[in-house]
Image: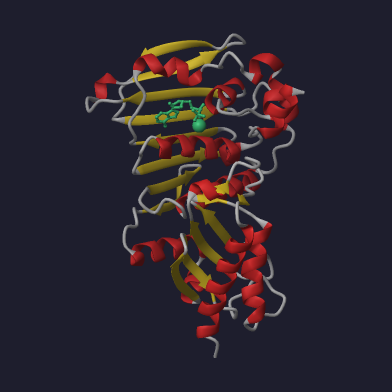
Amino acid sequence: PRLANQIAAGEVVERPASVIKELLENSIDAGSSRLDIEADEGGVKLMRVRDNGVGIDKDDLPLALSRHATSKIYELDDLEAVATLGFRGEALASISSVSRLVISSNQTEQPSAGWSARSEGRDMETELMPAPHPRGTTVEVRDLFFNTPARRKFLRTEKTEFGRLEDVVKRLALSHFDVAFSLTHNNRPVHSWRAANTRIEQERRVGQICGSAFMENALYVEVERAGLKLWGWVALPAFSRSQADLQHFYVNGRAIKDKLVTHAVRQAYQDVLFHGRHPAYVLYLELDPATVDVNVHPTKHEVRFRDSRLVHDFLFRTLHHALADVRP
Ligand code: ADP
Ligand code: MG
């Protein structure tokens, strides 16, 4: 049962998008200010993330790829299970076991001081080699699921897989304005976002990601009360959508999908002239981390607020007030 619980709580190496999410989160954790992402064939053939973060010391490179003593991979000893059921806290080791992964890194300013590591075979023996690399880290993942044909069958078309990968990049770009991003698919530049430090620059990035029509109809909101802060952009009720596809909500920088939040926002719209369509928004809620649990389920993006009533009321009132103010 313990193992089953670990699996239930774990992330899943399900598709290129889930790999990219892990790689980008690692790069952001490393303090990077620029992330360059390349993908080929929807990411299945190749995903490469290059960052300018703190890098990894030569001696730590094998550790970054290694399974821990309690590893599920080790316990399960079954690659299909890794690909299907997931992992936790061992993203690189897991991804490496179902792809051809090379990690190159350098902590110094001398490019010649870089090293790269890869793990090979069933024992995942790590091989270290000198490799020139500027300060930072590059992780290259080739041939995802080459050794797990059952999992490979679940992959959709190149276009679908790339679309999901792109969504992951967009979601992270909306919550890390201070990081520059570029995304290339099959050698074609798809996106390039500069670091956005002022509100005007942030609005340009939101417009690039969510569309200029959204930005043109968006209202900027920023309200702080009783330890809760809400800021971001809500589209006027006239710019509603037939699908709930433009709803970005972040709690302390982390993308979430939560019933309470969706409900509060929807209520605010409904009260102000809104007819059964879906509101569009990019909103950031900031609150004391001790009053919210964002790890309820790592893949479902749910949260648990200690005082959910307070949060609901705050969201409802803030948005209702903002929208009612501009009602024609
Ligand atoms: P976790 O992120 O849960 O620690 P991972 O398998 O994702 O596990 O990464 C293993 C370790 O490798 C990280 O803890 C970090 O020390 C190092 N690492 C991975 N990617 C990077 C990166 N881009 N820059 C610096 N260190 C990294
Ligand atoms: Mg990680």
Residue 302 x %, y %: 64, 49
Q: Would you say residue 77 is visible in this rendering?
A: no
Left or right, 301 with respect to 212, comes to: right
Residue 256 x %, y %: 59, 52
The structure residue drawn at horizontal position 22% and vertical position 28%, both measured from the top left corner, is: 109
Q: Residue furthest bottom?
A: 328
Q: Nearer the viewer, residue 82 or 119?
A: 82
Relative to 9, residue 157 above or below? below
Count up the numbered dots.
0
Residue 68 x %, y %: 56, 16
Q: Would you say residue 46 is visible in this rendering?
A: yes
Q: Nearer the viewer, residue 45 or 86?
A: 86
Left or right, 139 with respect to 293, comes to: left
Relative to 287, residue 108 above or below? above
Q: Which of the colour schemes (rainbow, by chain, secondary structure, one colour) is used? A: secondary structure
The structure residue drawn at horizontal position 65% and vertical position 19%, both measured from the top left corner, is: 73
Residue 177 x %, y %: 39, 54
Q: Residue furthest left?
A: 110
Q: Nearer the viewer, residue 275 or 320?
A: 320
Which quadrant, please, contains the N terminus?
top right
Which quadrant, please, contains the C terminus?
bottom right
The picture quadrant where one finds residue 317 is bottom right
Relative to 192, residue 157 above or below? above
The structure residue drawn at horizontal position 56% and vertical position 67%, both measured from the top left corner, is: 315
